[in-house]
Amino acid sequence: MALLMEHQFRQLSADRQVETRPFLDAVSYLPLFFDCLGPTIFAPIKVDLIGNITKIKAVYDTNPGRYKTLQQLLEAEKEMYGSEWPRVGATLALMWLKRSLKFIQIFLQSLVDGEKDQSNPNLMRVNITKGYDVALKRYHGWFVQQLFKAALYAAPYKSDFLKAISKGRDVKEEECLEKIRKFLINFSANIDAVYDIYSRMNADLDYKV
């Protein structure tokens, strides 16, 4: 659990604005999360995550003052790109990034809620599948969905996953799950706020890859 708890997301302010720099700092550690799920099998999602973080950071670094919050960044790009927006720039990268983050959010929430395969409770297929179905499946074509199914059967056991995110330390399952619950408080608030921005600005695109 150290992997997540050492890089907590900030608590949102009353206006629910997501500050760009702290958000990017926090998400930059999440590619390591997919190493715990399976460094080879989940590599495509990890690579996608890293690529989108890099694109958003490159835009932010050009004018940190103008892009202080994610809302300001999207508003600036909407004005800048006109009819091409939102299919361009950091707006497009953040659209895909938030979906990967939603996968993590739903997967971890399912885990701490105790959802499991009753015939083999140490498997995480129920939790991973729920995360994928909610966050990513509708945006993936048949081929990518088949790759996910293959990855699902290569996922680690829950006990091994919890040990991996605890940086190899043996931890009691309930203690680890309680720390995940605490991590999810600010993490979920940030992800939900980003989704709200896209909803308000009508910036989401519904196409398959």
Image (cartoon, helix red, strand yellow):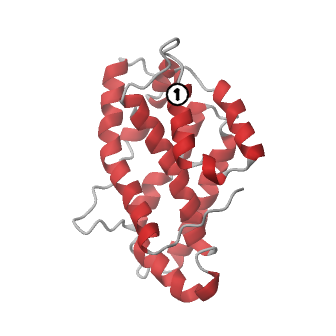
Name the residue beneath numbered marker 1: 126
Residue 30 versus residue 201: which sits nearer the camera?
201
Residue 178 versus residue 99: which sits nearer the camera?
99
Quadrant of the rendered image containing residue 35: top right
Residue 147 versus residue 157: which sits nearer the camera?
147
Q: Is residue 135 above or below residue 130?
A: below
Residue at the spot 42% in from the left edge and 26% down from the top edge: 115
Residue 10 percent across, percent down from the top left: 31, 55
Provide the secondary structure element on which disc 1 rests. helix
Residue 41 percent across, percent down from the top left: 69, 34
Residue furthest to the top: 119
Image-based side of 39 in relation to 77, left or right: right
Residue at the spot 39% in from the left edge and 75% down from the top edge: 68
Quadrant of the rendered image containing residue 51: bottom right
Q: How many marks?
A: 1
Residue furthest to the left: 14
Residue at the spot 42% in from the left edge and 67% down from the top edge: 20
Residue 61 versus residue 121: which sits nearer the camera?
121
One can see residue 52 in this view: yes
Q: Considering the image in quadrants, where does the N terminus appear?
A: top left
